[in-house]
Image: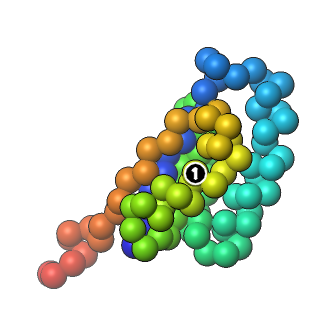
Amino acid sequence: MQFLAITRRRTERFSDAEFAVALPPEAARARELYANGAFRALYSRGDIPGAVIVLEAADAAEAEKIVASLPMAQQAMMDIEVIPLRPYRGFVGG
């Protein structure tokens, strides 16, 4: 099952310097999740600091666990919303 995770950095609580330290391990974990197939696509947001992630998981609990494994999630440096995706109804059943 696919999910969409939308993240927003908590820039009001953490400094640019703190994010600079957190970004290399965050990127390394994201590459690992992409390489093992959990992350299907990953984009930086164009409106605010954060990311949009398309991920594959068995259920919502697993999807949330995967995203929670990101270092910035573990340090409460970002807000995360995980949304389940369904096939577009215009492509299903006619």
Quadrant of the rendered structure where residue 61 is? bottom left
- Residue type beneath disc 1: Ala
Q: Is 19 drawn above or below residue 41 in the view shown?
A: above
Instruction: Locate the N terminus and report the quarter of the image it occupies.
Output: bottom left
For disc 1, the marked residue is: 68
The spot of residue 3 in percent (x, y) is: 43, 61
Location of the C terminus by quadrant is bottom left
Question: Can you give x and y, in whole percent of width and height, for residue 90 in the image?
Answer: 20, 70
Q: Is residue 76 above or below residue 29?
A: above
Vertical comparison of 84 with 94: above or below: above
Query: From the viewer's perspective, is 19 left or right of 1?
Result: right
User: At 74% from the left edge and 58% from the top edge, which residue is drawn?
Assistant: 29
Residue 2, horizontal then vertical, whole percent: 42, 68
Kindly identify the residue that appears in the image at 39 percent across and 61 percent down: 60
Q: Secondary structure at mark 1?
A: helix
For the image, the number of numbered tags is 1
In percent of the image, x 48 and y 61: which residue is there? 63
The x and y percentages for residue 44 are 63, 45
**Residue visible at 78% across and 42% down in the picture:** 23
Q: Residue furthest top?
A: 12
- Residue 48 lies in quadrant: top right
Residue 78, located in which quarter of the rendered image? top right
Position of 13 with respect to 56 (left or right) is right
Residue lying at the far left of the rendered structure: 94
How is this picture coloured?
A: rainbow
